[in-house]
Image (cartoon, rainbow, N blue to C red):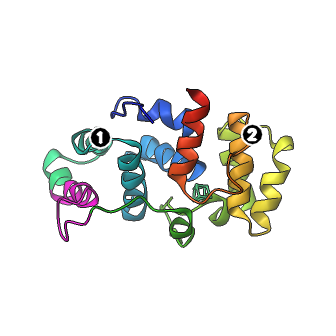
Amino acid sequence: NGDVVTERNVHTLCDESFPLCMKILQFHLQRDNHLRNGGRFQYTLFLKAIGLPLSNSMFFWKMHFRKRVSEEVFVRRYSYHIRHAYGLEGKMADYPPQNCAEILKGTPGPLEYHGCPFKVLDQDRLIDVLKRSGLKIEACQDILNLSANGSPQNACARYFEMTQGETYPHPTVVHPNDYYDASRNIKR
Ligand code: SF4
């Protein structure tokens, strides 16, 4: 969609245009300077698909992880996985970004933040996350109901509407990168 994406503007693009499943990963990466494997895989592929090149992705992850681990540990434990996601290791598969159906299968354990928040978060945690997005909880009853009633992708479309100020341009959200593109189209 024409945006140049580097490790320096991921944060801004996240605030403006990422779906909630990715905003949560960015939040924890920034806060904890770490993400476990499921979150790293989900987020690396999403960022690759919005246009973050491999070298910038390496900088991006290193910028955070280096606050916790040495360069040597970063290279040994984590850089392989980033190169792998870009199809440069292992099967050399150029992995596509995960769609909502795949993300919805995620069952994050303790200290894991991947998966779809409209499915995996209980109401109290979802309320906290919605507040963090700047939403007033009184206005979020629809999102909470759709989420509690097993319609996470409709809850996500409603979240789009409330944070972007426009109706989601498809019947429901089926891919986080479609969500991102729809938001960038509004910002252009
Ligand atoms: Fe992410 Fe899809 Fe869930 Fe929206 S519905 S938060 S894009 S997994």
- Dot 2 falls on a residue whose secondary structure is helix
Label annotation for residue 67: 1
CB within 8 Å, label 1 to label 2: no
Direction from residue 27 to residue 55 in the image, left or right? left
The relative height of residue 129 versus residue 113 in the rendered view (above or below) is above
Q: CA distance from mark 1 to mark 2?
A: 35 Å
Label annotation for residue 179: none
- In terms of depth relative to the viewer, which is nearer, 3 or 35? 3
- In terms of depth relative to the viewer, which is nearer, 81 or 70? 81
The relative height of residue 128 versus residue 11 in the rendered view (above or below) is below
Q: Kindly report which numbered mark, 1 or 2, lies closer to the viewer in this rendering.
A: 2
Q: Which residues are magenta?
A: 76-93
Q: Residues within 10 Å of mark 1 (few under 14, many from 20)?
A: few
Closer to the chain start, of discs 1 and 2, is: 1
**Looking at the image, which residue is at 25% across and 66% down?**
93
Is residue 114 visible in the rendered structure shown here? yes
Picture coordinates of residue 167 (x, y %)?
A: 74, 42
Residue 79 within the magenta-colored segment of the rendering = yes
- Dot 1 falls on a residue whose secondary structure is loop
Q: Residue furthest left?
A: 72
Q: As shown in the figure, which amino acid type bears the numbered disc 1?
A: Lys
**Looking at the image, which residue is at 24% across and 45% down?**
54
Picture coordinates of residue 187 (x, y %)?
A: 58, 28
| Residue on which disc 2 sits | 162
